[in-house]
Image (cartoon, rainbow, N blue to C red):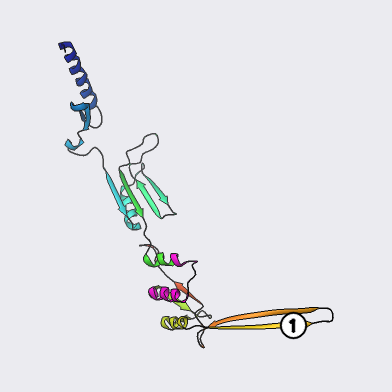
Amino acid sequence: MDRSAIEAIRENNAFNIRHVDNTDIKAAVIPHNAKLESLEHLMSTPYQFRATFVTHIVSEFTDYSTKNIDNDSAIYIDTHNMEASAIFDHGTIITPEWATHTASIALTKKPAFDELLEKNNVFCNQQDLIDFLSDWEQHIILFDGNNEPILFQKAINRIRKLTLNKNSSAEFEQGDFNHKASAMESVEIKSGDNEIPAYFEMLVQPYQGFSE
């Protein structure tokens, strides 16, 4: 290789280095495979702030967002999944930013609320209902047909011992040129001489930080 070719390579490399030095992040061309490496780790401070904040508590998410949000920030909320994401260095379509500073929240159902949703619109047999009520006694109040509360253990005992009364009757009517027949059936469920609970209320905190 003649001297002019070597000088041309040197000049080309010098141009590349000067060009890289003029970027926002200082960088150098490494001779091996001409690989481009960032020199940010050699700077006294990072080129930009990078952070990912993750929580499942609403107050923590709102506090962190309030402290860091500005005019170039954006918050996206997924109400169906009870999740939200905040991008503090979001920017705009015209002047986008790097989106390296974010916060996210995914609310976690409290155990009692989760169990309540699982049982909703699901048929429970006698034992299933007893187990469900007993497991979540601290959240449940049972009422009779007059909307009066029943002591929990009394209500459970009534549910444990049920009596099914089934009555059938038939009515026949005979006319000169017609005949009518009807059948009626009634079913009554009781617990000895007591009424079984008519309904119950379950008060739960759905997510941490929420009211019942």
Q: Is residue 10 left or right of residue 75?
A: left
Amino acid on which the number 1 mark rests in the picture = Phe
Locate residue 84, reporting x and y percent: 38, 51
Give the dominant element type of the magenta stretch: helix, strand or loop: helix
Which residue is rendered at x = 42% and y = 80% of the image?
Answer: 152
Locate residue 153, reporting x and y percent: 41, 82
Which residue is rendered at x = 62% and y = 84% of the image?
Answer: 167
Q: Is residue 30 left or right of residue 59?
A: left
Quadrant hosting residue 129: bottom left
For residue 175, above or below residue 11? below
Other residues around mark 1 within 10 Å, as few (<14) / some (14–19) / many (≥20): few
Which residue is rendered at x = 39% and y = 76% of the image?
Answer: 134
* On-image quarter of the N terminus: top left
For the residue pair 196 and 41, the one nearer the viewer reads as: 196
The answer to whether one can see residue 181 in this image is yes
Locate residue 32, reporting x and y percent: 18, 27
Which residue is rendered at x = 72% and y = 83% of the image?
Answer: 171
> Of helix, strand and loop, which one carries label 1?
strand
Q: Which residues are magenta?
A: 117-138
Locate residue 205, reporting x and y percent: 39, 66
Q: Is residue 174 left or right of residue 204?
A: right
Q: Is residue 42 left or right of residue 163?
A: left
For residue 129, above or below residue 7? below
For label 1, the residue is: 172
For the residue pair 197 and 54, the one nearer the viewer reads as: 197
